[in-house]
Image (spheres, rainbow, N blue to C red):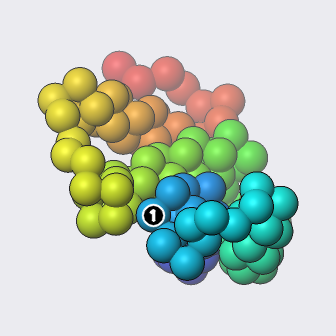
């Protein structure tokens, strides 16, 4: 659970770094270099959470590298859905919802079976 919570926190920072500048009024009229440097500053906090999440999840034997990546991508989309709704004022349409559901299915298949274990019946 600690790994997942760290991944959620890191993805909040990464979403702000990647997309926050689109709506941050205080960055209006600033140079692209300034926006990039601000985004890098925000991304630093993402790395401060992502690295411990991946190390802890992997080195504890709780998750494989593949599982960590699939979980992380799903969390990224979940965080982005909330961000897009609240900050970008975009709505979740049916096609995006179906895409997200398929990614949740990917997480299930990634973590439900041990690597190299038997195929599902």
- Residue 111 visible in the picture: no
> The C terminus appears in which quarter of the rendering?
top left
- Residue 26 visible in the picture: yes
Q: Picture quarter containing residue 23? A: bottom left
Label 1 environment density (alpha carbons within 10 Å; few <14, some 14–19, many ≥20): few
Residue wearing tag 1: 23
Q: Nearer the viewer, residue 120 or 109?
A: 109
Q: Which residue sits at x=62%, y=56%? A: 18
Q: Which residue sits at x=40%, y=35%? A: 103
Q: Residue furthest front?
A: 29
Q: Which residue sits at x=16%, y=29%? A: 94
Q: Give the SS element for disc 1.
A: loop
In this view, 13 is above or below 68: below
Q: Picture quarter containing residue 106? A: top left
In this view, 53 is above or below 76: below
Q: Is residue 86 left or right of residue 17?
A: left
Tell me where residue 17 appears, x and y as whole percent. Answer: 64, 64
Tell me where residue 37 appears, x and y as whole percent. Answer: 82, 68
Q: Which residue sits at x=41%, y=24%? A: 120
């Amino acid at each position: 659970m600690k790994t997942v919570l760290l991944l959620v926190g890191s993805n909040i920072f990464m979403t702000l770094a990647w997309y926050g500048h689109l709506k941050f009024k205080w960055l209006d009229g600033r140079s692209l270099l300034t926006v990039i440097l601000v985004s890098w500053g925000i991304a630093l906090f993402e790395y401060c959470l992502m690295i411990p999440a991946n190390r802890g999840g992997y080195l504890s034997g709780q998750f494989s590298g593949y599982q960590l990546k699939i979980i992380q991508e799903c969390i990224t989309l979940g965080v982005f859905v909330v961000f897009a709704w609240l900050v970008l004022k975009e709505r979740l349409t049916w096609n995006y919802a179906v895409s997200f559901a398929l990614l949740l299915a990917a997480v299930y298949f990634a973590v439900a079976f041990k690597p190299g274990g038997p195929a599902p019946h």
